[in-house]
Amino acid sequence: MNLHPAVDADVALEVAAHEALIRQTYKDSVGVLTWCVGMTNATGHTVQRYIGNPAPLQHCMNVYAWALQNYAAGVYRAFAGHKLTKAQFAAALSFHWNTGAIERASWVDLWKQGKKAEAKLAIMNWVTPPEIEGRREKERDLFFDDKWSNDGSMIEYTRVRSNMTPDWSSAKRINVATELRNAFAKTPPVTVDQPPQPNAPVEAPTLSPKSNAAGIIAIFVAAIAGIAGWLFTRR
């Protein structure tokens, strides 16, 4: 008997809401090549192919949906014999996608022992770097209080600098719900270059875009820069 929900578009949207979308390969804060929704070569789909080569949004969501299902196996093992609600499953999968550590996290063991209050506190031990705290709070609230946080949208950064770091001024908020639902409805094939390693240690957990407001501010800054550039060229 399967005690756990399957990965579906609702679950994938919740995880994606904590990530940024960058359709071409970039370097994360510690120099690891990353693409799409915080994906690295640990997914089994090598990301070097997207260096200077932005992928269509639907392709990004197709690969992300496939990779997320591989990460679900670790969640199933970690909670074997214990029934999870859809909210709990989504929160645990988000935690594992971000840390690769669902099978060794003490908060999981505490929850399985019925120590829910202690588990709720222990999940907040996973806040390195400190900027990840907001994401962990949302995962905690979803797992323990059934509080979903996504609205079907993500912050996308549309440009990467010559040193392969994201251009933070290129932020825009886009809705990805349709593309993700298409990805789960059609399950298109994905090129697998090497065995997926969903339990691989994460050197630096990806940081969530701070908020809708942060995205709006970045967009505003980009717009001002564009206007300034236009005025300069008019001289």
Image: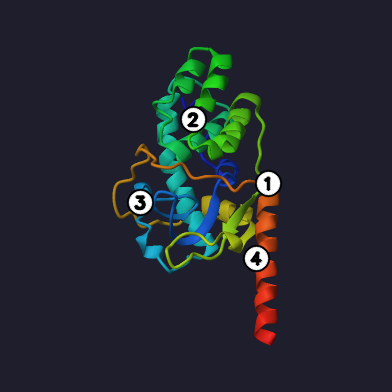
Q: Which mark is residue 222?
A: 4
Q: Residue 50 in the image: x percent, y percent?
A: 41, 64
- Are circles 1 and 4 on residues that touch, CB within 8 Å? no
- Are circles 2 and 4 on residues that touch, CB within 8 Å? no
Q: Which mark is residue 126?
A: 2
Left of 143 or right of it: where is 71? left
- Residue under circle 3? 41
Q: Residues within 10 Å of mark 4 (few under 14, many from 20)?
A: some
Amino acid type for the residue under numbered disc 1? Asp
Q: CA distance from mark 1 to mark 3?
A: 28 Å
- Are circles 3 and 2 on residues that touch, CB within 8 Å? no
Amino acid type for the residue under numbered disc 3? Asn
Q: Residue 119 in the image: x percent, y percent?
A: 53, 19
Q: Residue 4 in the image: x percent, y percent?
A: 50, 29
Q: Nearer the viewer, mark 2 or mark 4?
A: 4
Q: Residue at x 52, y 38 (%)?
A: 94
Q: Which mark is residue 151?
A: 1
